Amino acid sequence: MSRTSRKREHVEHALTTGQSGAHGLEDVKFVHNCLPDIAYEQVDTHTTIGGLALSSPIVVNAMTGGASETYTINQSLGMLAHETGMALAVGSQMAAIKEPSLIETYRIVRREHPHGILFGNLGAEATPDMALRAVDMIEADALQIHLNVMQELIMPEGERDFSGALRRIEAIVTALEIPVIVKEVGFGMSREAAEKLVSCGVAAIDVGGRGGTNFAQIENMRRTQPFDILNEWGISTAVSLLEVTQLAGRVDVMATGGIRTGLDVARCLALGASCVGMAGAFLRYAVDGEMQKAIEYVKSLHEELTVIMTALGASSIASLQRVPLVVTGDTYHWAAQRGINCTALARR
């Protein structure tokens, strides 16, 4: 099957399956503050990731590209990012690296978001030359390198050799003058993997936790004999954040994986993320061409986040990361067995 046909199928199946909602963020509870001592107007949600200044902590995360049908999706996403001031990441640009006629399905985002922050995107099989071409293609401000081992293994025509990925990522970090962000596509990130990525100089890690678009399920829908036992594979978004934010101060963290509400956003930021990425939540709006509804949705997310931060007495993302959190349920049990100190979060 051609790469473009696969891209079309991914979009169709993503719309059909939706998001699993198993992100684990419901296990993260805020301690209410009845004396916040700030005003709503004092709350500032500006943030940074990999040295880049973001006017919103919400990023339109990587979805698609590389097929004629995805041109209009990326055009809509570019318009949404421009209207709301969000950064935007394109889907994997490997299709356009291999077939230049597809470049416009990615380049459209720069035309629609001419002065905004854009992230390019390639897989860990990419070379430094490919990375440079991807960056130039959309005048990217950062480059995402995505990790999707389980997706590739389930994918009928997927990759089977993952050797040398860390070495290639390090070579790309050395070759580029812009930040490199390594992201999981929905199976989560462990502390051990994050430590290896930090050692090779990446600027930020996107944990890509289980709970959003389920690429195991999507690839199983494309198989004659599906591996359904792997549909729930991975580490939840909440757990991934607890794992990776153990490296706070050494690398910036981005949270993705099933985030849909302002409360989800607030929980991720309080767990230590600098920003959050949302993809599936915006895809339906883009496909249906409902730009005004998408803009209103983003406004509601920002309003919800600001209300929550006001109630907690947190005037900035940094201060939100200092409020007490109580971690419960499966997330707590995972953290306890992995040696992650949840009591410290509850008493900060």
Image (cartoon, grey):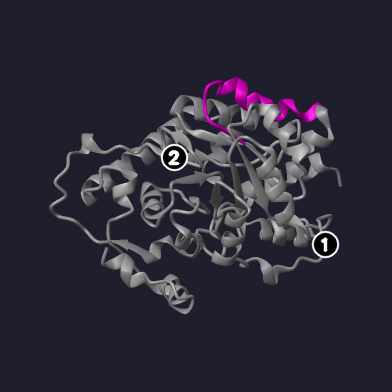
Between 35 and 12, the residue placed more toward the observer is: 35
Crowding around mark 2 (Cα neighbors within 10 Å: few <14, some 14 to 19, many 20+) is some
Question: Residue 203: x, y in percent?
Answer: 55, 46
Q: Is residue 260 above or below residue 30?
A: above
Residue at (61%, 20%) from the top-left corner? Answer: 111
Q: Is residue 150 left or right of residue 342?
A: right
Residue type highlighted by circle 1: Thr
Label disc, if present, on residue 111 of the rendered structure: none
Question: Residue 118: x, y in percent?
Answer: 57, 32
User: Mark 1 and 2 residues: CB-CB less than 8 Å, in contact?
Assistant: no
Describe the element under mark 1 as helix, strand or loop: loop
* The C terminus: image quadrant: bottom left
Q: Is residue 103 above or below residue 171?
A: above
Question: Residue 69: x, y in percent?
Answer: 72, 32
**Residue 298 in sight here:** yes
Q: Residue furthest right?
A: 1
**Residue 221 in sight here:** no
Q: Which residue is mark 2?
A: 48
User: Label 1, label 2: how many angstroms apart (C-alpha)?
Assistant: 44 Å
Residue at (82%, 60%) from the top-left corner? Answer: 161
> Where are the magenta residues, as a range?
101-119
Crowding around mark 1 (Cα neighbors within 10 Å: few <14, some 14 to 19, many 20+) is few
Q: Which residue is mark 1?
A: 224
Q: Quadrant of residue 38?
A: top left
Magenta stretch: residue 178 in it?
Answer: no
Q: Nearer the viewer, mark 1 or mark 2?
A: 2
Describe the element under mark 2 as helix, strand or loop: strand
